[in-house]
Image (tube, rainbow, N blue to C red):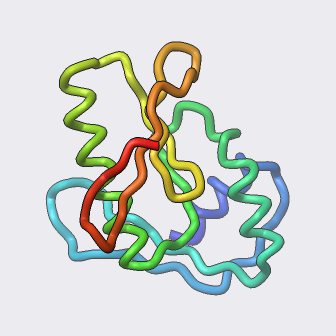
Amino acid sequence: MLEAVDGIFSKLGGKQIPIDDIFRLGKASQRGPRPLLVKLLRNLDVKFILKNKKNLGKEKIFIDKDKSIQERAKEKKLRDEFNVLKRADNGIRMAFSKGSLLVLKGGGVVIKTLSYDEDQDVIHQI
C-alpha cells in the first residue's frame, strides 16, 4: 500500500510526503477496492495534497479530507437527492462546497444549491 500511495503522491507534485500510517476502511467485499485512510505527519502536506489533487486528471482516484460520521451522513443525504435529480436530467454534475451540494450544468454553471438541515431532517434549496 505504501508504494501505491507514494506513487499517487508523486503525481500530485513530485515532492516526498512523510506518511504516519495507512489502513483500509470497511470490510472486504466484492464491490471493489476499499478506501484507504492515509495519516500524514504535517497539516501542511494535507493542504498540499488537497490543493493538487486535480493533477490526477481522469484517474479513478478520489482524495478528500477525513470527515466525521455526521458529515458523511449529511453528504449521503445530499448525494441521494442529487441522484433523484440526475435521473430527470443526465447532463448535470455535482460538487460539494462548504457543506452544501452544488448542482452544475454545462460548463460548470451552478443551477441549484442544496443544503441539509439535520434538525428538521429536510433538504433545502438555497
Position of residue 69 relative to residue 111, above or below, is: below
Q: Residue at x 47, y 25 (%)?
A: 111
Position of residue 53 relative to residue 59, above or below, is: below
Give residue 74's quadrant in the image: bottom left
In this view, the residue in front, 46 or 87, is 87
User: Extreme left residue here?
Assistant: 30
Left or right placement of residue 104 versus residue 69 in this view: right
Left or right placement of residue 92 versus residue 37 in this view: left
Left or right placement of residue 50 versus residue 88 in this view: right
Position of residue 124 relative to residue 72, above or below, is: above
Q: Residue at x 74, y 48 (%)?
A: 52
In this view, the residue in front, 7 or 53, is 53
Left or right placement of residue 40 versus residue 107 in this view: right
Give the number of callouts: 0
List x then y, in percent, for residue 49.
Answer: 72, 58
Q: Residue at x 67, y 40 (%)?
A: 54
Q: Residue at x 44, y 32 (%)?
A: 112
List x then y, in percent, for residue 106.
Answer: 50, 13
In this view, the residue in front, 78 or 117, is 117
List x then y, in percent, for residue 4.
Answer: 55, 60
List x then y, in percent, for residue 116.
Answer: 37, 58
